Amino acid sequence: MKHLFTFLLIFFASNSVNAQLVYSVDYESQADVKVFVVQYESQADLKVYKVKYSSQAGENDGKWFFTDYQSQAKKTIYFVNYESQADLKIFFVAYESQAGWRNNSKKQLMY
């Protein structure tokens, strides 16, 4: 019983560190989502933290891993030059705990 509890604890703790596998494409027509990086956190739909390892990937929670190849990604994104062109506005944060959605109505874009 002790081992089962320990396993479950480790399993759920490791799943709490999740990210989205994304790939930045060269052309707008290749993208699932068009993204604009805003200057201020208050302007963002999503606050994004770039994780270091793909093994942290999993959920739609603002923790992104940028893949080397498009085939490895769950979502392809294209960085647009103007806010009006974007489906999603993001702000890159310095700490993992800051990541997350500010505008839940846009959440379906990254599923």
Image: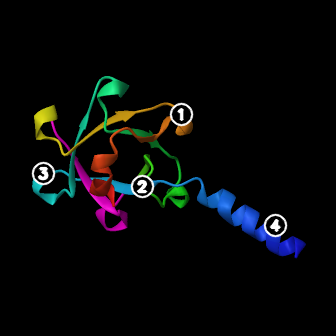
101 lies above or below 3: above
Residue at 50% x, 35% y: name it: 98
Q: Which badge, 3 or 4, comes first in the chain's sequence?
A: 4
Kind of residue indicated by mark 3: Glu
Q: Which badge, 1 or 3, comes first in the chain's sequence?
A: 3
**What's the mark number on residue 6?**
4
Q: Residues within 10 Å of mark 3 (few under 14, many from 20)?
A: some
Q: Which badge, 1 or 2, comes first in the chain's sequence?
A: 2
Q: Which badge, 1 or 4, comes first in the chain's sequence?
A: 4
The extreme top residue here reads 40
In the displayed structure image, the side of residue 35 where residue 51 appears, left or right: right
Residue at 19% x, 46% y: name it: 87
Provide the residue designation for mark 2.
60
**What's the mark number on residue 95?**
1
Residue at 16% x, 39% y: name it: 80
Q: CA distance from mark 1 to mark 3?
A: 29 Å
Kind of residue indicated by mark 4: Thr
Q: Assess whether residue 15 is covered by the magenta stretch.
A: no
Secondary structure at numbered mark 1: loop
